[in-house]
């Protein structure tokens, strides 16, 4: 039963005229007549007695009028309650490599906010976050930008940074000495398993140059990759920001990989972009990223 038809039915009953009710509600008389007829068809009986002087309720119409008023009130309250909930809840996903870039500052700012927005934060690898966004489990996420667009997401490129080769202290890697892609074939790698988005990027670049990779260990845990690098077990390939978010591994060395950059984007669930809470979180995320880049702490990063 369409609540709009019930509201129009009540207005016609109150005013005793389809024409007057249509004028009052600012809709056309034919549209009002059609909607009343549809409601009568759904009820299986006539609701009004029509005459030259207007309309009056039938017994069935009186019964419906008596019962639909409280129903419409309950529906209105429910719609308001759900609307407030939708406006006040946001689920966001951020990769572990962005923890010190965004996650902690974002969570702190929202905790101190007075708007009573309920935040649900998830930290996961990029492809998993994108999957959650596509099925509607989260409203916003940070992930590598994708070519094209789709109906199930909206993306805004934020920042570009290099992919870097990470090794132990004895590896002698330096931010000022980029490593050619061909060099990756001579390193024992500790990298995430497929379908990790970052792995896909450097694997495609290596395949285009006929560079074979020597993968020794696969793990989705960023801190474990860096811990094994610090113990000289092997090398890893990460975004530059991963080292900022894991300062405990200060004994590793790193160097950018020539020609390998990742563009990060803010992905949004298009069904939630109208939410005031989502829009506020989006603005805050962008502001925090801009501040980090402006501070110079995120070296090698640039806004796009």
Image: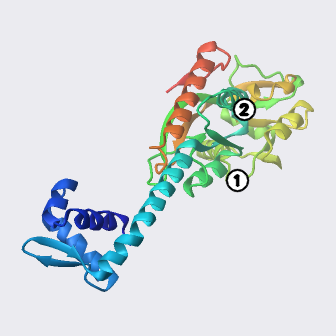
Q: What residue did someone put label 2 on? A: 99
> Looking at the image, which residue sits at the far left?
52
Q: Which residue is drawn at 31% across and 67% down?
A: 5
Q: In which quarter of the image is residue 274?
A: top left
Q: Which residue is drawn at 70% across and 46% down?
A: 125
The residue nearer to you, when weighing 63 against 270, is 63
Q: Quadrant of the N terminus?
A: bottom left
Secondary structure category for the residue under label 2? helix
The residue nearer to you, when weighing 263 against 122, is 122
Q: In this view, does 33 lie above or below 96?
A: below
Name the colour scheme. Answer: rainbow
* Residue 239 horizontal/vertical position (percent): 68, 33
Tag shown at residue 266:
none
Q: Distance between the residues labelled 2 and 1?
A: 22 Å
Tag shown at residue 194:
1
Q: Between tags 2 and 1, which lies in front?
A: 2
């Amino acid at each position: 039963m369409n609540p709009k038809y019930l509201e129009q039915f009540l207005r016609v009953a109150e005013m005793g005229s389809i024409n007057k009710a249509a004028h009052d509600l600012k809709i056309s008389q034919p549209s009002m007549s059609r909607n009343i007829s549809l409601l009568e068809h759904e009820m299986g009986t006539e609701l009004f007695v029509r005459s030259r002087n207007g309309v009056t309720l039938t017994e069935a119409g009186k019964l419906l009028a008596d019962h639909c008023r409280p129903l419409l009130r309950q529906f209105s309250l429910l719609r308001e309650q759900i609307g407030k909930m939708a406006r006040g809840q946001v689920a966001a996903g951020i990769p572990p490599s962005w923890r010190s870039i965004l996650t902690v500052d974002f969570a702190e700012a929202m905790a101190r906010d007075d708007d009573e927005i309920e935040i649900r934060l998830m930290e996961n690898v990029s492809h998993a976050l994108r999957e959650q966004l596509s099925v509607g489990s989260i409203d916003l996420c940070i992930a590598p930008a994708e070519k094209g667009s789709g109906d199930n997401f909206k993306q805004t490129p934020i920042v570009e940074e290099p992919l870097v080769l990470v090794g132990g202290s004895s590896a002698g890697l330096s931010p000022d000495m980029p490593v050619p892609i061909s060099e990756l074939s001579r390193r024992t790698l500790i990298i995430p398993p497929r379908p990790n988005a970052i792995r896909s990027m450097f694997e495609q670049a290596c395949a285009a140059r006929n560079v074979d990779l020597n993968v020794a260990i696969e793990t989705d845990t960023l801190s474990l990759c860096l811990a094994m690098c610090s113990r000289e077990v092997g090398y890893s390939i990460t975004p530059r920001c991963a080292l900022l978010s894991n300062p405990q591994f200060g004994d590793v060395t790193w160097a950018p990989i020539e020609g390998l950059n990742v563009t990060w984007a803010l992905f949004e669930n298009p069904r939630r972009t109208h939410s005031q809470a989502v829009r506020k979180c989006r603005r805050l995320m962008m502001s925090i990223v801009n501040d980090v880049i402006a501070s110079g702490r995120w070296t090698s990063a640039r806004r796009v």
